[in-house]
Image: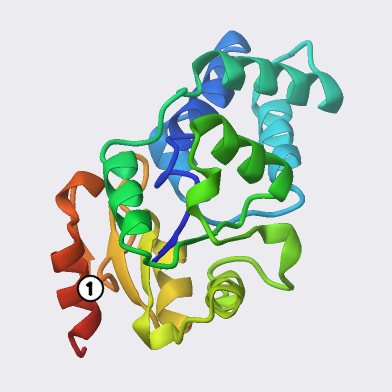
Amino acid sequence: MIFDFDGVILDSETPEYEAHRRIYEACGVSLTPEEWCSQIGIWSETYEDRWFERLSEQAASHPFDRSSFRAEKSRLFQEVVPGEPMRGIRELVEPLATAAVPLAVASSSPARWVVPALERLGLRGHFHAIVTGDEVANRKPSPDSYLEAARRVGAEPSRVIAIEDSGPGIAAARAAGMKAVVIPHWLTETHDLSGADLRVSHAGELTLSLLESLCARTR
């Protein structure tokens, strides 16, 4: 089992959007979920610059330079980021770990965010491998992170189930030759999620027997 991180293990998607939305609102500019959701699942070095430049183009004036924009976004994010994993994640991960199912994380986010966040959630010890975007040549929708995670846990991709919340994530898992379960986030419900083998509303709906059945199923 290989899990995406943002929007699957931890709802960091909502506070990330909310932090940007609040900054925009304070500057008299709207930022809708529809505008935001198109970039979920796709990470780039210019991520923060993109939203800063958009604000600069649309606001009559604002008090931020690039550095202060990032600092304010980080402050607002920390105010609202949850201290617990998403619904059903703990109840899914712990029995899988007890059953000796190899578990990994494949994320496009950098290690400086993913690893400490897993530690704060008390889940770090359950994962045999953590692959982040700064460790692979190409981030999602490329399959690189999923293939590397499978390699590190010694699993054949065809015997792996990926847990995702976004269109680019599902595309990455499928390109890696894996089955994909999608748990749509409220910000990714408009993505093309048709490539998933199974759709559930939260991780608590997944059981070991259901996952075993899915893994044995042929497309």
Q: Residue at x 41, y 27 (%)?
A: 84
Closest to the observer, 179 or 93? 93
Give the residue displayed 64% in from the left and 27% down from the top. 58
Instruction: Determine crowd level at label 1: few under 14, some 14-19, many 20+ residues with C-alpha closer than 10 A.
Output: many
Residue reaching furthest bottom? 218
Identify whether 198 is placed above or below 108: below
The answer to whether residue 80 is left or right of residue 76 is left
Query: Where is residue 79 drawn, in percent x and y?
Result: 56, 13
In the rendered view, tell whether residue 175 sits above or below residue 98.
below
Three-letter amino acid code of the residue under disc 1:
Asp
Residue at figure coordinates x 57%, y 75% from the top left? 142
Task: Please name the residue that numbered disc 1 is placed on.
Answer: 197
Image quarter of the N terminus: bottom left
Residue 80 is situated, as x and y percent measured from the top left of the image, at 50, 17
Which is nearer the eye, 42 or 127?
A: 127
The residue drawn where x is 63% and y is 12% is 27
Query: Residue 209: which quarter of the image?
Result: bottom left
Image vertical order of residue 167 relative to residue 150, above or below: above
The reply to whether residue 65 is visible in this rendering is no
Q: Position of residue 184 (x, y in %)?
A: 29, 50
Please count the marks in the image: 1
Q: Position of residue 175 (x, y in %)?
A: 46, 82
* 60, above or below 187, in the image: above
Q: Is residue 146 left or right of residue 96?
A: right
Asked which secondary structure carries label 1, the reply is: loop
